[in-house]
Image (spheres, rainbow, N blue to C red):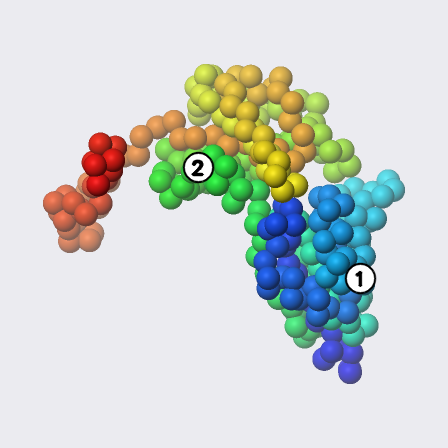
């Protein structure tokens, strides 16, 4: 029972390169008995080692003939076992540790049920980098996000008046969970789906955030119809701007007891007015 009160788990994100790591995360790395790491490049791992030499690369669980799902279970089991042994564990994943990181959620749930202290800290993820690099505000039209293969294989409603982010477009249709590439017909299939909602010549962006400081992101704008022939590494995110204007639901003003004149504060200035001011 002594170990049960001592062991704990901090789950943190180091962003996509060392410059993204928060001071809070660095503090937890320094204070940990054990540090577990999945990082995109040796520079990030070396940075973590300077903060705490007791760092272990969880990337080793990807080795061998295992699926990604099996790897995530092995990672989660390792986190849980170390905490049960009484260690203060800090697990670091690149990007945000709760976005497309199944093992952290698995370990979090298991350890909470057993009464251990568990906390997740945020990190800079690919979508945060995308908004900055493309100079976008997701609040302008609203923004929806789906995982590529899930979007393809489930009945979903896409709002073409809002921006759309498709995660893991570089793994779309990859059913074996072993390859780091789209499935044979994955890009063609999801393009077929998207063409039901967007015109063939709608401009979409293949985006990859840099994983080293000082490097430029990939921001390739192509026509939707050209997506099946595009080069799409596994770390690519697809951004699709809105293609329809938002429709004002005038009748709902009654629900708020307002008139259109009451919304004058929401009027956007023209470009000329902005420049003059």
User: Where is residue 13 drawn, in percent x and y?
Assistant: 63, 54
Residue drawn 57% across the image and 21% down it: 227
**Mark number for residue 53?**
1
Question: Which badge, 2 or 1, comes first in the chain's sequence?
Answer: 1
Q: Nearer the viewer, residue 80 or 11?
A: 11
Residue drawn 68% across the image and 75% down it: 115
| Residue annotated with mark 2 | 135
In screen coordinates, is 20 left or right of 140?
right
Can residue 98 be seen in this snapshot? no
**Which quadrant of the view contains residue 186?**
top right
User: Can you say whether 36 is above or below 271 in the image?
Assistant: below
User: Where is residue 91 drawn, in percent x and y?
Assistant: 71, 59
Gap in angstroms between the C-alphas marked 2 and 1: 38 Å
Q: Are marks 2 and 1 in contact (CB under 8 Å)?
A: no
Residue drawn 71% across the image and 44% down it: 40
Say which quadrant the N terminus sits in.
bottom right
Say which quadrant the C terminus sits in.
top left
User: Can you say whether 42 is above or below 196 in the image?
Assistant: below
Q: Secondary structure at mark 1?
A: loop
**Mark number for residue 230?**
none
**Which quadrant of the view contains residue 192?**
top right
Q: Nearer the viewer, residue 188 or 34?
A: 34
Can residue 255 be seen in this snapshot? yes
Q: Secondary structure at mark 2?
A: loop
Q: Residue furthest bottom?
A: 2
Mark 1 closeness class: few <14, some 14–19, many ≥20 residues within 10 Å: some
Residue drawn 51% across the image and 23% down it: 221
Mark 2 closeness class: few <14, some 14–19, many ≥20 residues within 10 Å: few
């Amino acid at each position: 029972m002594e170990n049960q009160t001592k062991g704990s788990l901090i789950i943190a994100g180091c962003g996509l390169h060392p410059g993204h790591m928060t001071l809070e995360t660095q503090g937890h790395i320094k204070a940990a008995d054990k540090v577990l790491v999945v990082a995109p490049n040796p520079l990030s791992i070396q940075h973590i080692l300077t903060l705490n030499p007791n760092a272990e690369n969880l990337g080793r669980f990807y080795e061998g003939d295992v699926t990604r799902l099996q790897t995530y279970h092995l990672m989660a089991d390792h986190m849980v076992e170390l905490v049960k042994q009484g260690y203060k564990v800090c697990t670091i994943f690149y990007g945000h540790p709760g976005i497309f990181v199944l093992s952290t959620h698995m370990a979090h749930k298991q350890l909470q049920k057993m009464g251990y202290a568990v906390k997740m800290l945020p990190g800079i993820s690919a979508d945060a980098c995308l908004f900055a690099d493309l100079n976008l505000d997701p609040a302008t039209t609203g923004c929806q996000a789906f995982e590529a293969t899930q979007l393809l294989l489930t009945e979903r409603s896409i709002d073409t008046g809002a921006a759309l982010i498709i995660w893991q477009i570089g793994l779309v249709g990859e059913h074996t969970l072993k390859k780091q590439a789209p499935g044979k017909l994955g890009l063609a299939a999801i393009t077929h789906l998207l063409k039901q909602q967007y015109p063939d010549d709608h401009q979409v962006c293949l985006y990859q955030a840099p994983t080293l400081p000082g490097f430029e992101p990939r921001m390739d704008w192509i026509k939707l119809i050209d997506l099946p022939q595009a080069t799409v590494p596994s770390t690519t995110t697809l951004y699709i701007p809105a293609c329809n204007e938002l429709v004002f639901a005038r009748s709902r003003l009654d629900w708020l007891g307002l008139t259109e004149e009451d919304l004058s504060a929401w009027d956007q200035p023209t470009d000329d007015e902005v420049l003059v001011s």
